[in-house]
Protein backbone atom coordinates (compact mmCIF):
# COMPACT_ATOMS: atom_id res chain seq x y z
CA UNK A 1 0.00 0.00 0.00
CA UNK A 2 1.73 3.22 -1.19
CA UNK A 3 0.73 6.61 0.23
CA UNK A 4 1.60 9.79 -1.65
CA UNK A 5 0.75 13.32 -0.54
CA UNK A 6 -1.74 14.99 -2.88
CA UNK A 7 -1.22 18.23 -4.80
CA UNK A 8 -3.01 20.16 -2.03
CA UNK A 9 -2.18 19.89 1.69
CA UNK A 10 -4.38 17.28 3.33
CA UNK A 11 -5.09 15.21 0.21
CA UNK A 12 -3.60 11.72 -0.10
CA UNK A 13 -3.33 9.31 -3.02
CA UNK A 14 -3.22 5.65 -1.98
CA UNK A 15 -2.20 2.72 -4.19
CA UNK A 16 -3.11 -0.61 -2.58
CA UNK A 17 -0.92 -3.69 -3.09
CA UNK A 18 -2.77 -6.07 -5.39
CA UNK A 19 -2.03 -9.82 -5.19
CA UNK A 20 -2.98 -11.33 -8.52
CA UNK A 21 -3.02 -15.06 -9.18
CA UNK A 22 -4.71 -17.62 -11.43
CA UNK A 23 -8.00 -17.05 -9.54
CA UNK A 24 -8.07 -13.26 -9.85
CA UNK A 25 -6.79 -10.82 -7.22
CA UNK A 26 -6.79 -9.93 -3.51
CA UNK A 27 -6.05 -6.60 -1.87
CA UNK A 28 -6.51 -4.89 1.46
CA UNK A 29 -8.73 -1.93 0.52
CA UNK A 30 -8.28 -0.28 3.93
CA UNK A 31 -5.94 -0.94 6.86
CA UNK A 32 -6.33 1.45 9.79
CA UNK A 33 -2.84 1.13 11.31
CA UNK A 34 -1.17 1.79 7.94
CA UNK A 35 -3.54 4.67 7.20
CA UNK A 36 -2.80 6.24 10.61
CA UNK A 37 0.96 5.69 10.36
CA UNK A 38 1.26 7.06 6.82
CA UNK A 39 -1.06 10.06 7.16
CA UNK A 40 -0.17 10.82 10.79
CA UNK A 41 -3.87 11.08 11.61
CA UNK A 42 -6.01 8.61 13.57
CA UNK A 43 -9.00 8.99 11.28
CA UNK A 44 -12.18 7.18 12.31
CA UNK A 45 -14.52 6.22 9.47
CA UNK A 46 -18.13 5.75 10.56
CA UNK A 47 -20.10 5.31 7.33
CA UNK A 48 -19.52 3.55 4.00
CA UNK A 49 -21.32 4.75 0.87
CA UNK A 50 -21.75 3.25 -2.57
CA UNK A 51 -23.17 4.63 -5.81
CA UNK A 52 -23.62 3.13 -9.28
CA UNK A 53 -23.64 5.46 -12.26
CA UNK A 54 -23.82 5.19 -16.00
CA UNK A 55 -21.26 7.01 -18.18
CA UNK A 56 -21.50 10.80 -18.16
CA UNK A 57 -22.99 11.18 -14.67
CA UNK A 58 -21.57 14.02 -12.60
CA UNK A 59 -22.14 13.98 -8.85
CA UNK A 60 -20.80 17.12 -7.13
CA UNK A 61 -19.43 19.43 -5.91
CA UNK A 62 -20.65 18.45 -2.46
CA UNK A 63 -19.68 18.91 1.17
CA UNK A 64 -21.25 18.88 4.63
CA UNK A 65 -20.78 21.94 6.85
CA UNK A 66 -19.14 21.70 10.28
CA UNK A 67 -19.74 20.09 12.73
CA UNK A 68 -20.96 17.45 10.26
CA UNK A 69 -18.09 17.86 7.78
CA UNK A 70 -16.88 14.60 6.29
CA UNK A 71 -13.50 13.28 5.33
CA UNK A 72 -13.83 10.73 2.48
CA UNK A 73 -11.67 7.84 1.35
CA UNK A 74 -12.96 7.23 -2.18
CA UNK A 75 -12.31 4.50 -4.74
CA UNK A 76 -13.80 2.93 -7.85
CA UNK A 77 -14.52 -0.79 -7.68
CA UNK A 78 -15.50 -1.07 -11.36
CA UNK A 79 -15.57 1.51 -14.12
CA UNK A 80 -13.75 4.83 -14.03
CA UNK A 81 -14.22 8.41 -12.83
CA UNK A 82 -12.48 11.75 -12.98
CA UNK A 83 -12.52 12.56 -9.27
CA UNK A 84 -12.13 16.16 -8.09
CA UNK A 85 -11.51 17.73 -4.69
CA UNK A 86 -11.76 21.54 -4.26
CA UNK A 87 -10.09 23.24 -1.30
CA UNK A 88 -12.77 25.39 0.42
CA UNK A 89 -10.82 26.14 3.61
CA UNK A 90 -11.01 29.93 3.56
CA UNK A 91 -7.59 30.49 5.21
CA UNK A 92 -5.85 27.94 2.98
CA UNK A 93 -3.23 29.26 0.53
CA UNK A 94 -4.84 26.92 -2.02
CA UNK A 95 -8.42 28.12 -1.37
CA UNK A 96 -10.51 27.47 -4.49
CA UNK A 97 -7.83 25.27 -6.05
CA UNK A 98 -8.50 21.62 -6.89
CA UNK A 99 -6.86 18.31 -7.65
CA UNK A 100 -8.29 15.99 -10.29
CA UNK A 101 -7.38 12.30 -10.42
CA UNK A 102 -8.40 9.26 -12.47
CA UNK A 103 -9.79 6.52 -10.23
CA UNK A 104 -10.75 3.22 -11.82
CA UNK A 105 -11.41 -0.44 -11.17
CA UNK A 106 -8.24 -1.03 -13.16
CA UNK A 107 -5.83 1.27 -11.28
CA UNK A 108 -7.53 0.67 -7.87
CA UNK A 109 -6.16 4.02 -6.78
CA UNK A 110 -7.79 5.63 -3.74
CA UNK A 111 -8.08 9.31 -2.85
CA UNK A 112 -8.40 10.66 0.69
CA UNK A 113 -10.22 13.99 0.87
CA UNK A 114 -10.30 15.60 4.35
CA UNK A 115 -13.06 17.83 5.73
CA UNK A 116 -12.83 21.28 4.16
CA UNK A 117 -13.03 20.12 0.55
CA UNK A 118 -15.93 19.98 -1.91
CA UNK A 119 -15.95 16.63 -3.71
CA UNK A 120 -17.38 15.37 -6.94
CA UNK A 121 -16.75 13.06 -9.86
CA UNK A 122 -17.63 12.50 -13.50
CA UNK A 123 -18.10 8.90 -14.59
CA UNK A 124 -16.12 7.88 -17.67
CA UNK A 125 -17.65 4.42 -18.16
CA UNK A 126 -21.08 2.78 -17.81
CA UNK A 127 -21.78 0.77 -14.64
CA UNK A 128 -19.23 2.68 -12.57
CA UNK A 129 -19.38 1.46 -8.96
CA UNK A 130 -18.07 4.14 -6.59
CA UNK A 131 -17.39 3.26 -2.96
CA UNK A 132 -16.21 5.47 -0.12
CA UNK A 133 -15.68 5.68 3.63
CA UNK A 134 -16.80 8.80 5.53
CA UNK A 135 -15.53 10.22 8.81
CA UNK A 136 -18.95 11.61 9.72
CA UNK A 137 -22.57 10.58 9.29
CA UNK A 138 -24.90 11.86 6.58
CA UNK A 139 -26.54 15.06 7.74
CA UNK A 140 -28.67 16.45 4.89
CA UNK A 141 -29.40 19.73 6.67
CA UNK A 142 -25.66 20.44 6.58
CA UNK A 143 -25.18 19.70 2.88
CA UNK A 144 -23.71 22.35 0.65
CA UNK A 145 -22.75 22.29 -3.01
CA UNK A 146 -20.74 24.36 -5.48
CA UNK A 147 -21.47 24.50 -9.19
CA UNK A 148 -19.44 21.86 -11.04
CA UNK A 149 -19.24 24.22 -14.04
CA UNK A 150 -18.19 27.30 -12.03
CA UNK A 151 -15.79 29.41 -14.09
CA UNK A 152 -13.78 30.47 -11.03
CA UNK A 153 -13.22 26.84 -9.99
CA UNK A 154 -12.19 26.15 -13.61
CA UNK A 155 -12.45 22.37 -13.30
CA UNK A 156 -11.56 20.76 -16.62
CA UNK A 157 -14.24 18.10 -17.08
CA UNK A 158 -13.85 17.91 -20.86
CA UNK A 159 -16.56 18.74 -23.36
CA UNK A 160 -19.52 17.23 -21.51
CA UNK A 161 -23.24 17.58 -20.99
CA UNK A 162 -23.44 15.50 -17.83
CA UNK A 163 -26.38 13.74 -16.25
CA UNK A 164 -26.87 15.52 -12.92
CA UNK A 165 -29.36 15.72 -10.05
CA UNK A 166 -31.77 18.61 -9.53
CA UNK A 167 -29.70 19.53 -6.45
CA UNK A 168 -26.59 19.91 -8.58
CA UNK A 169 -28.44 21.97 -11.17
CA UNK A 170 -29.01 24.67 -8.53
CA UNK A 171 -25.56 24.63 -6.90
CA UNK A 172 -23.92 27.82 -5.60
CA UNK A 173 -21.52 29.99 -7.58
CA UNK A 174 -18.06 30.13 -6.03
CA UNK A 175 -17.89 33.94 -6.33
CA UNK A 176 -20.76 34.34 -3.85
CA UNK A 177 -19.75 31.39 -1.70
CA UNK A 178 -19.04 32.03 2.00
CA UNK A 179 -17.03 29.07 3.24
CA UNK A 180 -18.07 27.52 6.55
CA UNK A 181 -14.51 26.08 6.95
C1 LIG B 1 -24.89 11.16 0.41
C2 LIG B 1 -26.07 10.40 0.99
C3 LIG B 1 -27.28 10.37 0.34
N1 LIG B 1 -28.33 9.66 0.89
C4 LIG B 1 -29.58 9.62 0.14
C5 LIG B 1 -30.18 10.98 -0.15
C6 LIG B 1 -30.87 10.81 -1.49
O1 LIG B 1 -32.18 10.33 -1.30
C7 LIG B 1 -30.06 9.72 -2.18
C8 LIG B 1 -29.10 10.26 -3.22
O2 LIG B 1 -28.33 11.27 -2.59
P1 LIG B 1 -27.49 12.29 -3.45
O3 LIG B 1 -28.25 12.67 -4.68
O4 LIG B 1 -27.03 13.39 -2.52
O5 LIG B 1 -26.23 11.39 -3.88
P2 LIG B 1 -24.90 11.92 -4.57
O6 LIG B 1 -25.22 12.96 -5.59
O7 LIG B 1 -24.14 10.73 -4.97
O8 LIG B 1 -24.16 12.64 -3.36
C9 LIG B 1 -22.80 12.37 -3.04
O9 LIG B 1 -22.05 12.92 -4.07
C10 LIG B 1 -20.71 13.29 -3.82
C11 LIG B 1 -19.82 12.52 -4.77
C12 LIG B 1 -20.22 13.22 -2.45
O10 LIG B 1 -19.02 13.32 -2.21
C13 LIG B 1 -21.15 13.09 -1.33
O11 LIG B 1 -20.80 11.96 -0.55
C14 LIG B 1 -22.58 12.99 -1.68
O12 LIG B 1 -23.10 14.31 -1.67
O13 LIG B 1 -29.31 9.06 -1.14
C15 LIG B 1 -28.21 8.97 2.08
O14 LIG B 1 -29.17 8.33 2.56
N2 LIG B 1 -27.01 9.00 2.75
C16 LIG B 1 -25.93 9.69 2.24
O15 LIG B 1 -24.84 9.66 2.87
Image (cartoon, helix red, strand yellow):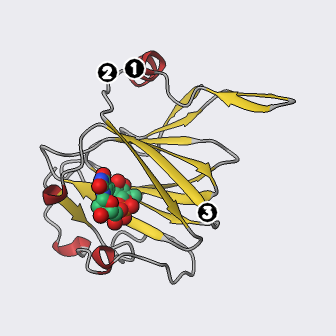
N-term-proximal mark, 2 vs 3: 2
- Residue 96 visible here: no
Residue at the image point whose x is 82% and y is 31% from the top = 23
Residue at the image point whose x is 19% and y is 58% from the top = 140
54 and 152: which one is in front? 54
Density class for disc 3 (Cα within 10 Å; few <14, some 14-19, many ≥20) is some
Frontmost of labels 2 and 3 is 3
Residue 12 place in picture, x, y as percent:
46, 37
Q: Contact (CB < 8 A) between labels 2 and 1?
A: yes
Density class for disc 2 (Cα within 10 Å; few <14, some 14-19, many ≥20) is few
The dot on residue 177 is: none
Local secondary structure at mark 3: loop
Number of numbered tags placed on the structure image? 3
Cα distance in 3D space between marks 3 and 1: 32 Å
Cα distance in 3D space between marks 2 and 1: 5 Å
93 and 67: which one is in front? 67
Cα distance in 3D space between marks 2 and 3: 33 Å
- Residue 170 visible here: yes
Q: Is residue 46 left or right of residue 133?
A: left
Q: Is residue 106 left or right of residue 28?
A: right
Local secondary structure at mark 2: loop
N-term-proximal mark, 2 vs 1: 1
Q: Is residue 91 left or right of residue 167?
A: left
Residue at the image point whose x is 29% and y is 37% from the top = 135
Note whether ligand 1 is within 8 Å of mark 3: no
Residue 58 place in picture, x, y as percent:
46, 70
Mark 3 sits on what residue? 127
Note whether ligand 1 is within 8 Å of mark 1: no
Mark 2 sits on what residue? 42
Note whether ligand 1 is within 8 Å of mark 2: no
Quadrant (top left, top right, bottom left, bottom right) of the N terminus: top right
Mark 1 sits on what residue? 36
Amino acid sequence: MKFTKGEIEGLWVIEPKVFGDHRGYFMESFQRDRFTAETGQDIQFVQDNESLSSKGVLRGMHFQKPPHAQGKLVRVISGAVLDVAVDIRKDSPTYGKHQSILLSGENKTQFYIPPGFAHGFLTLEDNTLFSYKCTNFYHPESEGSLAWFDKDLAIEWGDIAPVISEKDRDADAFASFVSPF
